[in-house]
Amino acid sequence: MCGRFTQTQSPETIAATFQLSVLPQLEPRYNIAPTQAIAAVLQTPDQPQRHCKFLRWGLIPSWARDPAIGSRLINARAETASEKPSFRTAFKKRRCLILADGFYEWQRQERGKQPFYFQLQHGVPFAFAGLWDCWRGDGEGAIASCTILTTTANSVMQPYHHRMPVILNSEDYDCWLDPTLTTPAPLQPLLRPYPSEAMTAYPVSKTVNKATHDSPTCIRRAEGKAQQLSIME
């Protein structure tokens, strides 16, 4: 599951990390929520160089009658996405890197749900494995949208949720974006849980619970929660 995430890196850092020839127009985002515009890296037959594009979070299949379906398709199971009608064409032809540097998950506790913030070690930027599509409704214009693939939780995530977003290894970016690859065989092995030893987690303020709150306070460690929940295995 992935329902909120962050992307706070500078355009220069993102361009260098993802080999973009043009600086993306990015601002820090601390509480990205479904239906909002999110930054993704694409590589298509028409545009073979990597480029950044903003996509609506919540995939609207090109054949959908109502774009509202997108609010239910913010995530796709990596194990079955290549087969499901909502995702299989995108899996074959329209894969993307969704830019991030952290994400949130909530743990049920005695006093309610406590949000936790997950990062890679040292807070480096990374990419979720994503799928995208373009919906053209009658008179409503085109909507480019996306979904984030999920997989089974690693040991960092297991206390909070049985699923986690697919974080791709940087050496797999070329393969995932390659528009000439149209079968699941070379792609499916990339969609695995990220190594636990490369991740950290800590509790944050419940400020993040409200999607309209988008500031550095969202990722600030919760008061009274001094112990960082890193798992080193």
Image: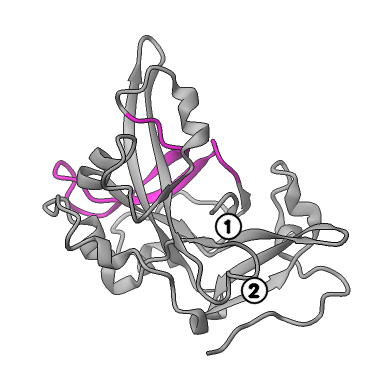
Image quadrant where residue 46 sits: top left
Amino acid type, residue under disc 1 in the picture: Thr
21 lies above or below 231: above
From what the image shows, is residue 150 above or below residue 137? below
The residue lying toward the viewer, choosing from 139 and 233, is: 233
Image coords of residue 133 (percent x, y): 32, 36
Q: Residue at x 63, y 82 (%)?
A: 230
State the residue position of label 2.
201
The stretch in magenta equals: 33-61
Q: What residue is drawn where x is 77% and y is 70%? A: 221
Q: Quadrant of residue 117?
A: bottom right
Picture mark count: 2
Residue placed at 14% from the left, 50% from the top? Answer: 182
- Residue 215 inside the magenta-drawn segment: no
Name which of mark 1 and mark 2 comes first in the sequence. 1
Image-quadrant location for residue 168: bottom left
- Callout 2 crowding tier (Cα within 10 Å): few <14, some 14–19, many ≥20: many
Describe the element under mark 1 as helix, strand or loop. strand
Q: Which mark is residue 103?
A: none
Separation (CA) of disc 1 from disc 2:
14 Å
On the image, numbered disc 1 is attached to which residue?
A: 6
